[in-house]
Image (tube, rainbow, N blue to C red):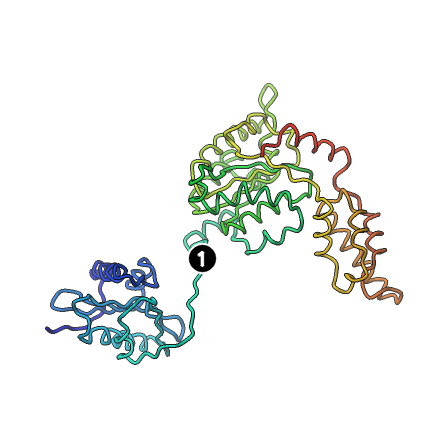
């Protein structure tokens, strides 16, 4: 038997697939997925071993700066022990060295029995090394589309950053996040993952924050649709809305937020019809089509749920209609704690500040906290202040901060929960 090593050609892809699948069938799951291996064969460095016209082995590498990695190394079972594996690695080493690599590294499955080829080729085994990987949630080909839509991939941890609001978080975690994050588990129990929800409540209570936190928790793309921006499109608001959702349909996973949805889904009335009636009709057509695709969630947020068209909230369009209200005492304490500097924590009567800020939204609390810190800073500069904001500073800031939500609005919200919430 004679064999030779040569550079891989495009027509060798089928043989590389065969060798990769044989490696997998042996119980040693390849570290790199087949798609990655084939990409490196065509775009990076690859060599094959041939007996006559038959490919009996392959080594595929990828260079990154001064280091190269063995993406795949495999020899047909009947040709093990004949030096082909070591020769393939030597040929790969020669080519990556020419490309500028100083180190050639390999990750092999723990179950792989054939390591002699690596040892014969001069590789040394590193002890106490653990291989970790993370599959990126949004692939490169999606990024351009996401950027065009004005969307983004949000940082991890936003869910944990939602202070307090335990009741709302628990409800959203169980109703929305769990079925979407664990679709197989949901299917086992006959639960259909939600496709569209409405979040309603007074201004500043955190509806947008919750939508972003859901996207962060699921590690899905986040796209916010702004009706006011779409209105400037030459195609008109209805046409721009239709085109935006057509593009969104090409995303693999997405949380889509329409904030202040009452701008385009208010009650249809009047004769002749108002200019926005066509937009409302278009949105009512879009939602059923959106619901047909898995791995996506539409969140429509509104401060004025009473103004929404009755057909918009009909069963079948939205799985849940979720109230997001003012933070309770526990939530206010958690929100205040985010803005109190360490120097002020020990002496602060947090309970008094929390009680005084009843009826505040998270945004109100943030404003009051920053106002107290600014006042304490100015007092310190003038020579008469404490080391940090005091309880008196916070209570004074609360007393002069106008609450976003009036008693009347809070009362209407309580009525809306009774008549319109769907949990």
Please provide percent x and percent y for residue 210.
60, 46
User: Which residue occupies the foreground of this view, 125 or 290?
Assistant: 125
Q: Position of residue 386 (x, y in %)?
A: 85, 64
Instruction: Please give left or right for residue 398 compared with residue 311 in the image.
Output: right
Q: Is residue 135 above or below residue 91?
A: above
* Quadrant of the rendered image containing residue 173: top right
Horizontal relation, residue 305 to residue 287: left or right: right
Which of the 4 image quarters holds residue 175? Answer: top right
User: Callout 1: few (<14), some (14-19), or many (20+) C-alpha neighbours within 10 Å?
Assistant: few
Residue furthest out toward the right? 384
Left or right? Give the position of 387 relative to 79. right
**Of residues 332 and 65, which is closer to you in this image?**
332
Left or right of 161 in this view: 376: right
Residue at 10% x, 73% y is 1
Q: Residue at x 19, y 66 (%)?
A: 77
Residue 91 higher or lower than 335, as above or below: below
Q: Position of residue 205 (x, y in %)?
A: 68, 43
Q: Quadrant of residue 229?
A: top right
Residue behind mark 1 = 136
């Amino acid at each position: 038997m004679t064999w030779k090593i040569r550079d891989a050609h495009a027509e060798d892809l089928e043989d590389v697939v065969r060798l990769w699948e044989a490696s997998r069938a042996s119980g040693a799951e390849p570290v790199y997925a087949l798609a990655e291996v084939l990409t490196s064969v065509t775009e990076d460095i690859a060599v094959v071993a041939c007996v006559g016209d038959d490919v009996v082995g392959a080594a595929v590498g990828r260079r990154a700066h001064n280091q190269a990695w063995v993406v795949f190394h495999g020899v047909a079972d009947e040709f093990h022990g004949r030096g082909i594996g070591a020769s393939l690695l030597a040929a790969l080493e020669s080519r990556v060295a020419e490309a500028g690599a100083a180190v050639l590294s390999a990750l092999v499955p723990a179950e792989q029995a054939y390591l002699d080829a690596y040892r014969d080729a001069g590789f040394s085994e590193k002890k106490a090394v653990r291989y970790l990987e993370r599959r990126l949630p949004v692939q490169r080909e999606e990024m351009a589309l996401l950027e065009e839509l004005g969307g983004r991939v949000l940082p991890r941890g936003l869910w944990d950053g939602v202070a307090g609001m335990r009741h709302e978080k628990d409800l959203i975690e169980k109703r929305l996040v769990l079925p979407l994050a664990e679709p197989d588990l949901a299917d086992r129990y006959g639960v259909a993952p939600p496709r569209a929800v409405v979040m309603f409540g007074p201004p500043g209570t955190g509806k947008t924050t919750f939508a972003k936190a859901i996207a962060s928790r699921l590690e899905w793309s986040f796209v916010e649709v702004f009706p006011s921006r779409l209105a400037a499109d030459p195609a008109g608001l209805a046409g721009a809305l239709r085109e935006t959702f057509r593009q969104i349909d090409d995303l693999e996973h997405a949380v889509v937020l329409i904030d202040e949805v009452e701008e385009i889904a208010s009650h249809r009335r009047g004769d002749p019809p108002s200019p926005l009636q066509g937009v409302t009709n278009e949105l009512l057509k879009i939602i059923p089509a959106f619901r047909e695709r898995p791995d996506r969630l539409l969140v429509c947020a509104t401060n004025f749920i009473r103004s929404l068209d009755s057909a918009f909230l009909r069963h079948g369009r939205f799985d849940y209609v979720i109230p997001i209200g003012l933070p309770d005492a526990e939530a206010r304490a958690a929100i205040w704690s985010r803005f109190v500097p360490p120097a002020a924590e020990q002496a602060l009567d947090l309970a008094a500040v929390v009680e005084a800020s009843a009826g505040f939204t998270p945004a109100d609390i943030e404003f009051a906290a920053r106002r107290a810190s600014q006042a304490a800073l100015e007092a310190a500069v003038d020579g008469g202040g404490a080391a940090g904001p005091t309880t008196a500073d916070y209570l004074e800031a609360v007393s002069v901060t106008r609450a976003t939500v009036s008693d009347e609005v809070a009362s209407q919200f309580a009525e809306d929960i009774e008549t319109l919430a769907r949990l």
